[in-house]
Amino acid sequence: MDDSGLVERYLEHVRVEKRLAARTVELYALDLQKLAENAGKAGVALTQVHNAHVRRWVAQMHGGGRSGRGISLILSGWRGFYAWLGREGLVPSNPVQDVRAPRVAKPLPKALSVDEAVQLAQFCEDAADPWLEARDAAIVELLYGCGLRVGELVGLDGQASSAARGWIDLQAGEAHVLGKGSKWRMVPVGAKAIEALRHWLALRAGGPHADAAALFIGRNGTRLSAQAIWARLKRRSLQAGLATPVHPHMLRHSFASHVLQSSGDLRAVQELLGHANIGTTQVYTRLDFQHLAKAYDAAHPRAKRK
């Protein structure tokens, strides 16, 4: 069977037996067309392709500007094709098996500038619902002021107990949270966050479901979900006039970046974030350098490009 017949048989296999979506089958067809073109230029049949051929084609795609992610997806399609050929007894080994796409640089976490974070924290919605406003303001202050994960925030209870997954000690100015790996950590709570929390707790105590265990509740008295906080924060950030919708982890990134910019203490930021490995925290040094580079480009007379 010629190359085109093999490709058609494989596409029929993934369409009928694996029941892949029509769009996925179309993408596989495009990837295999590229494979057949490469094999044709090299003067080999698809069943004669070797590991060295595939590595050369990866290098050519990378040199031509294709992203590492794009190459990785193409290789995945080729790998599946040769795995099927192997099961059919048509190739002795998979020439794509140990070939990987060039590493993709991890994008920097998105963080707000200090001015944007303050703009969001100081925003007060002009609405006839002080209960909701106080709750959302306290959520923003805790996420940005303590660098909490959204899961840690929703796990907070109104007071310490044996069953609590976290709580705030307003007198001591401390948040006790249960983070990843079921590890407890203590984070300082700033004056603005304490002020916002006291306001929220006062309104919460006078409203319905005041005896609910969760610190942050909805109108029905149930603990707020992470999805609800995402939606409320997105809405609030757009109302505050920020150009980009804000999500909870962006406030955690902003917290880490701003503390590092002010203190230069990477170990302290690691402890505050609850990272087990400082390598995870080091991404914020790149954010910090990016901030310094922008300030340098804007301020230094010899840095400005024509």
Image (cartoon, rainbow, N blue to C red):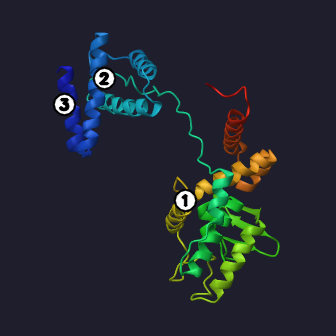
Quadrant of the rendered image containing residue 33: top left
Whole-number angstrom distance, CA of label 1 to CA of label 3: 53 Å
Q: For residue 217, which quarter of the picture?
A: bottom right
Q: Earlier in the sequence, mark 3 or mark 2?
A: 3
Q: Sort mark 3 into few (<14), some (14-19) or many (20+) by Cα contacts within 10 Å.
A: few
Residue at which label 2 appears: 35
| C-alpha separation, residue under disc 3 versus residue under disc 2 | 14 Å
Q: Which residue lies at the image location 57% right of the left edge and 72% below the top edge?
A: 125
Front one among 1 and 249: 249
| Contact (Cβ within 8 Å) of mark 3 with mark 2 | no
Residue 148 appears anywhere in the view: no
Residue 117 lies, with reference to residue 75, above or below; the image says below
Amino acid at dot 1:
Gly
Determine the secondary structure under disc 2: helix
| Residue corresponding to mark 1 | 241
Which element carries disc 3, helix, strand or loop?
Answer: helix
| Residue pointed to by mark 3 | 8
